[in-house]
Image: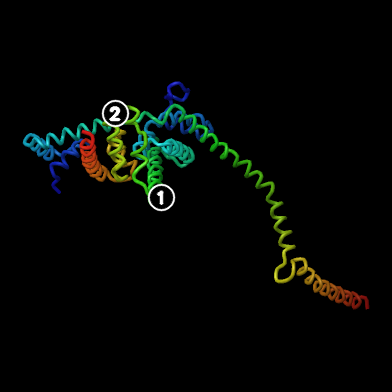
Amino acid sequence: MKRTIQELLYRSYDTELSAGEQTRLDKALADSPSLRRERDEIAALRDAASSSATPGFGPFFADRVMAAVESEAATVSDMPLFADLLTIFKPVAVAALLVLAVLIPIGGRTLIESLAADNQSLTSAAQSAYALDLEDMLCQTE
Amino acid sequence: MDTNTPQAGLSDQELIAQVRQGNTRAFRTIVERYQSQVAATIIGLIGNTPEAQDVGQEAFVRFFKSLDRFRGDAGVGTYITRIAINLSYNEIRRRSRHRQRHGGTDTQLAQAPDLADRTGSLEHRDIGRALSRLDPKYRSVAVLRLVNGHSTQEVATMLGIPVGTVLSRLSRAQKQLRELLAEYREEHP
């Protein structure tokens, strides 16, 4: 795609033109006073822009940033302590969860009540097993 | 500047290695080394407003927090400037939302006491005003290339766009800046 002379003029400040493009631009500049005026305006604009750079945020900016960074670093360095606390209190947390599970009613009965109901049948089963064992012992002695 | 600190002679990578080992103070040298570059970018994009320092601080803090992920593919200055650009865009969007909700005209940037006011140069003030009226995508290339003096390749890396796009946006930005400056000259001949 062939670029316009004006495009070439702008691009000539920021990139190297091909030999053909540079020749076209040089010829156009030589022939056109208005293009030369435009070139001078662009150069003036760029000079003004480059000299308008700010020197910085001010004398205490680095102090301010470092205060924030050190605060951040302190938070990060607290993380191992947090991990240690987590390790220590994990069993306590698990125990607390179990207590809650035992005390909170599910389906109308607490876990304790459910276990109590099951214990009844277990006791019965244990008694039956004991009776069978006793019968076996009696048979063996006979 | 960082010339008086023990870390002043260290390279960026050496400083970062020290910070990673827990020497947070080494980070100060990085801040001092790049604060002018970051300030020029942020102030160019959002003006020399009180928010500019907050954005600058946040840019460095975010860089500090991302040091573990920083591989050094891009230079430190490029990396921090990229963070600063993104945070500046956020600030521009925040202002835009604020204007939509509460009305008002553009912009804090145009009204802010910018560098031009400090130098007392009418030309610089006009440049600041004109930059503030550019669309952010043109403003960012103009600030990075024309004001901060980065190469077109650096600008492309910082903005994550091809060099060809940088060049076309630069052309457009300069045309608009010239038109705006011509308007200002007519207002105040």
The CA span between labels 2 and 1 is: 32 Å
Say if B167 sits above or below A125 in the image. above
Which chain is home to disc 2?
B
| Residue reaching furthest to the left | A31
Q: Point out residue B166 in the picture as x, y percentages from the top left corner.
A: 26, 43
Among numbered discs 2 and 1, the one appearing first in the sequence: 1
Q: Farthest residue in the top direction?
A: B4
Q: Position of residue A130 (x, y in %)?
A: 86, 73
The residue lying toward the viewer, choosing from B156 and B70, is B156
Quadrant in which the C terminus of chain B appears? top left
Determine whether the residue tagged by mark 2 lies in a helix, strand or loop. Answer: loop
Q: Please, what is the three-letter code of the amino acid marked with disc 1?
A: His
Who's the residue at 70% across and 57% down the image? A97
User: Which residue appears at 36% of the width and 28% of the height?
Assistant: A55
How packed mark 1 is, by other alpha carbons closer than 10 Å (few <14, some 14-19, many 20 or more), is few
Percent of width and height locating residue A98? 72, 59
Q: Which residue is mark 1?
A: B102
Q: Is residue A134 left or right of residue A23?
A: right
Q: Quadrant of residue A51?
A: top left
